Image (spheres, rainbow, N blue to C red):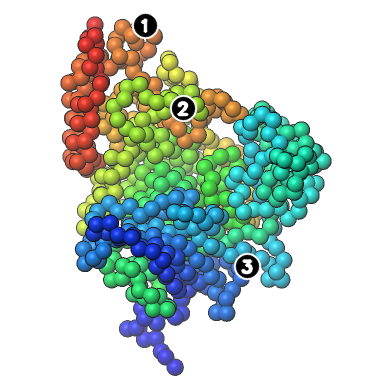
Amino acid sequence: MTKCFVTAILLCSPLLQARLTRIVVEARSAAGNRETVTGHFFGELDPGSTHNSIITDLNFAPRNANGKVEYSATFAISKPVDMAQANGVLFYSVPNRGNGAPAPTAPGEVSVVSGWQGDLTPGLNRQTISVPIARNPDGSPLTGPVFERFINMAPGTSTLPFVSLLYQRPVSLDTSQASLIRRSSPTAQPVTVPASDWAFADCTSTPFPGTPDPAKICAKAGFSPAFAYELVFTAKDPLVLGIGYAATRDLNSFLRYGDKDDEGNANPVAKSIRWALARGTSQSGNFIRSFIHLGFNQDETDRIVWDGVNPHIAARQLALNYRFAVAGGTAGLYEPGSDGVVWWSPYADSTRNREKAGLLSRCSVTRSCPKVIETFGGVEFWYLRESADLVGTDAKSDIPLPPNVRRYFLPATSHGGGPGGFNVAGTHNKTCVLPLNPNPETETMRALSSALIEWVTTGTEPPPSRYPRLEKGELVSAAGFSPIASAPSPDGLVNSIYDFDFGPLLRYNDLSGVITKQPPTIRKVIPTLVPKVDEDGMDIGGVPSVLRQAPLGSYLGWNVTAAGFDQGRICGLLGGYVPFAQTKAERLASGDARLSLEERYATHQGYVAVVRKAADEAVAERFLLPADAAKLIAEASASKVLTAPTLSLR
């Protein structure tokens, strides 16, 4: 009998642990001294392992002959053709809704993406994962309530397809076993649509009750854009979506530590990785936060997976690890995500009667916590409920950061930032009242990504954290804002945090388990704060971009919906922009209290000087790379800011 000695643990432990079992390279393409490798990887998970037991419904998934639960997923790796040229860094980019390709930031870097979201349909250039359906031991279906909301349909619409429910299908097409209501506003009393007046069906080519369809609803009288419609039904056959965390863990661990799979297929980057890092934006940033919180940054042989991570514009947990999960949410009405632990340090959420915990609680015990650079902007406060991450649900004091976490606020930005440039007029879209906020995050993020790599590979500390503090008066109520004369008021726009009751079977801190109440009831509204603003209505503090320090108007972390059911309410993830007047005379004529461009900068050369000073200071503080500084200065010099011959101080 073969024995596993301590000295051979790395060789023997794969035989005892669930893991990536097979990796198949299906295509290679080279460009210069780099190549991209794509294919599938396969794995199996032991439901009885403490490394996997937190995955909801894993114990209800079908098992292979070894008693393990199987999965398969896609991957893509960009790497040097000659791995002797690798710099030892693996940077994993979490795909957002399956979208994403490997994008190395340095010539010797290994860049990786893979599938993790199991409710997506496979497609060209989409990263996906195949996970099993959970069923009762006798083969009967697991069931539970699900919720879908419909707004802004075209007048005369008879049929509505499910939008957020990508795989959840009703146990029965009998509408008497479901519920459809309509509301004239989010707070209006619901009006029930009689079961006889709608169907799970498609009526686009066949009159009501139409052709039966479990992924659509049809109304006898049609749907009106004056209402929001809320559908609740009992679904069957939940996917075990939480496997996406384990699959990501196992692929990254294999690429970092493995040599060959069970069939002898080589690790494409074997023995070349010294450090592993991860980045994720928005939904995929929430993935990173929950990945760490749920303990997946430790592999099944107790080794650390990622040494450093950057969750960007991600204020919540990912709604992935509960029965009938909807992984693609964006903090809409009744969507889970802000309901559990969203802070890094341990905090007692007494407002919602939750146990004290932090995102790093599990990895602190297993000594598998990564270095963290967390980044977010203005819209994250207004729409994604960022303030609870900083001050908890009582909003009484700042929650301190652990020493391995740096936090940077990118003030006065939309979700992910704008396109940048030095365009005075700005650009409009039909969705929002105000022009779109152009204030960029890209250049700052490049510098912070570089800082994270240095922190992990050399131990060089990043710049000190910069974010709004309650103790400094930098976080305030979203009510009582002084409006800009030429813009709508933001009063009442903030997307509040709620204490939702999803039922007793949901493990709220971990956003795991089973939701039994849909839609949830609201127990209470939780204080939701936003950054303090200056006299121009722009967020103060943090790490301002060069454009924020040389503004051409007011860059706002909020905007107002122009039309539709949500008219007058916050315009989702889009921030606004209100240009400054060109001259003092122009602003006085319009009643604008904000200084004009000529009062701020006098001349084009004066404006470029402000840009140059801001860029030089940002480089010195390590918030801007020298190449980006030179580019921004050149763009400002070539811009038309204050170049008209008629512009002069009055």
| Whole-percent x, y for residue 650 in the image | 24, 6
Residue where numbered disc 3 is placed: 60
Vertical placement of 556 versus 486: above or below? below
Q: Secondary structure at mark 2?
A: loop
* Distance from the alpha carbon under mark 2 to that under mark 1: 27 Å
**Which mark sits nearer the N-terminus, 2 or 3?**
3
Residue at (44% x, 93% y) in the render: 1
Q: Residues within 10 Å of mark 2 (few under 14, many from 20)?
A: few
Task: Please name the amino acid that badge 1 sits on.
Answer: Ala
Residue where numbered disc 2 is placed: 429
**Which mark sits nearer the N-terminus, 1 or 3?**
3
Task: Please name the amino acid that badge 2 sits on.
Answer: Asn
Task: Please name the amino acid that badge 3 sits on.
Answer: Phe
Is residue 69 among what the camera can see?
A: yes
Quarter of the image for residue 399 reads top left
Q: Residue 235 — which label?
A: none
* Distance from the alpha carbon under mark 1 to that under mark 3: 70 Å
Vertical placement of 593 versus 442: above or below? above
Quarter of the image for residue 26 reads bottom left
Residue at (63% x, 33% y) in the render: 153
Tell me whether circle 2 and circle 3 mark residues in contact (CB < 8 Å).
no
Tell me whether circle 1 and circle 3 mark residues in contact (CB < 8 Å).
no
Q: Residue 589 — which label?
A: 1
Q: Residues within 10 Å of mark 3 (few under 14, many from 20)?
A: some
Residue at (47% x, 69% y) in the render: 42
Q: Is residue 478 left or right of residue 311?
A: right
Find the residue positioned furthest to the right. Answer: 196
